[in-house]
């Protein structure tokens, strides 16, 4: 395995991590901003008001798209194992 192959694998790792973690982070950020605006408007400052909706929406996101996320991770790991087997 040469240096460019390692660089390609590292780029794939970062892209895959953004594909898997990005939607959850974006949903969490959007929900946090919406709840913060509502808290500022109503002057109710309860910490659980931001936590519970984030938890529920991330759970729904994992139920809906968890299979495709695991499929992407499985394909990546198969590729990594193929690269390891070919370099040995």
Image (cartoon, helix red, strand yellow):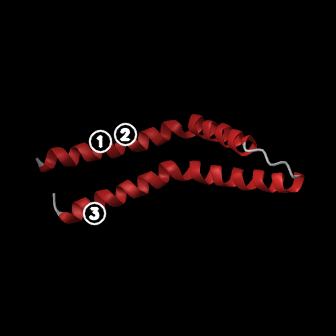
Relative depth, front residue between 5 and 34:
34
Which residue is more in the foreground, 82 or 14? 14
Q: Circle 2 is placed at which residue position?
A: 74
Rendered residue at 77%/50% (across/down): 35
In which quadrant will I find the N terminus? bottom left
Cβ–Cβ under 8 Å for marks 2 and 1: yes
> Where is 58 relative to 21, above or below?
above
Label 2 sits on a secondary structure element that is helix
Upstream in sequence: badge 3 or badge 2: 3
Residue 12 percent across, percent down from the top left = 36, 56
The residue to which callout 3 is attached is 7
- How many marks the image carries: the answer is 3
User: Gap between marks 1 and 3, in whole Å?
Assistant: 18 Å
Nearer the camera: disc 3 or disc 2: 3
* Relative horizontal placement of residue 66, taking residue 12 as reference (left or right): right
| Rendered location of residue 83, percent (x, y) | 21, 49
Q: Residues within 10 Å of mark 1 (few under 14, many from 20)?
A: few
Tags 1 and 3 touching, CB below 8 Å: no
């Amino acid at each position: 395995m040469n240096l460019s192959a390692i660089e390609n694998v590292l780029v794939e790792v970062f892209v895959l991590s953004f594909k898997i973690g990005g939607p959850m982070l974006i949903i969490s950020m959007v929900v946090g901003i919406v709840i913060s605006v509502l808290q500022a408007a109503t002057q109710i400052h309860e910490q659980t008001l931001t936590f519970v909706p984030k938890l529920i929406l991330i759970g729904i996101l994992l139920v809906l798209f968890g299979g495709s996320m695991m499929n992407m991770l499985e394909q990546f790991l198969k590729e990594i194992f193929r690269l390891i087997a070919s370099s040995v």
